[in-house]
Amino acid sequence: MSAVGVVLADSSVIAKRNMLKITRIPDLLVGTLISPIMFILLFGYVFGGAIDVPNYREFIVPGIFAQTVIFGATITGAGIADDMQKGIIERFRSLPMAQSAVLVGRTASDVVLNVIVTVIMSLTGLVIGWRIRTSFLDAVVGFALLLLFAYALSWVMGLLGLLIRTPEAFNNLTFLTIFPLTFITNAFVPLETFPGPLQTIAQWNPVSTLVQAARERFGNVPPGTELGTWSLQNSELYTLLWIVVILAVFVPLATRQYRRAAAR
């Protein structure tokens, strides 16, 4: 086998191990699914009437997609922190396997989990009136962009999981960081409703451009929406640039930290 083939083979074993864990502990999947479904129903039926946006249910669903896959990326870090705490990483280190396989397999399995969650959310959105108004190819690109952004972010979470080590501390930290990252955006309300400084932050927040790109691909952009900044006018390109930068920075950092942490 080539070096790449070894990494892919070992990573597939790790990914299979993580997926088997979900089948044996279904509470993990159920808990991940309940939150986005609850958000869709709450914002669609409870808060939607108080927000002045045409067809608010179509407006909100891409935002909840983005928020959910981003929170799904945190499963990578929590799982790695749990493995570190239980000594499983040391067991992996004793096996003749590629060093990067643990992180590659972990992030790959979480992409599969995000796909499952996205399918369930899409069905829930269809029930409350959300529709894709564009072509099939546009919809595929929109979903792929959401999953690709979450995959890039999972490498950030993987690095944090290696640094923090305990799942409890990791969950507390990510809750405090991911919530502002996803709520200071256009995911739930139009950017025009934000005060000056927060509006500027939200306009350049990559989560806002991810949501904007998804809405454009799904055909869910409300009529009369004003896109005042370059980031929103070129939302897809801006989001892809962030994905490339995150992967270029955090893949080597996480891999190096894994080697250091496991060698202790």
Image (spheres, grey):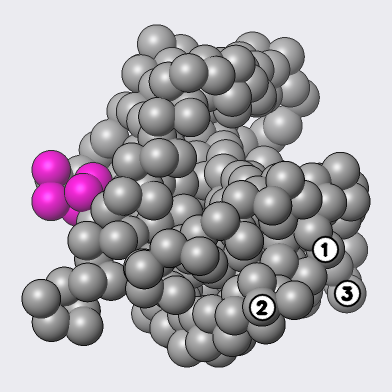
The foreground one among 177 and 98 is: 98
Q: Amino acid at mark 1?
A: Ile
Q: Within the image, what quadrant is residue 64 found in?
A: top right
- Residue drawn at (59%, 80%), measured in percent from left and top? 259
Label 2: element kind: helix
Residue 263: which numbered mark, if any?
2
Residue 197: which numbered mark, if any?
3
The earlier-in-sequence mark between 1 and 2 is: 1
Mark 2 surroundings: few (<14), some (14-19) or many (≥20) residues within 10 A: few
| 112 relative position to 44: left or right | left
Q: Main secondary structure of the magenta part?
A: helix
The foreground one among 174 and 166 is: 166
| 199 relative position to 240: left or right | right
Say which residue label 1 marks: 164
- Residue drawn at (74%, 22%), measured in percent from left and top? 47
Instruction: Indicate the position of residue 219 as horizontal and vertical percent values.
Output: 32, 45
The earlier-in-sequence mark between 2 and 3 is: 3
The quadrant of the picture occupied by the N terminus is bottom left
Q: Amino acid at mark 3?
A: Pro
Residue 48 seen in the figure: no
Q: Which residues are magenta?
A: 136-140
The earlier-in-sequence mark between 3 and 1 is: 1
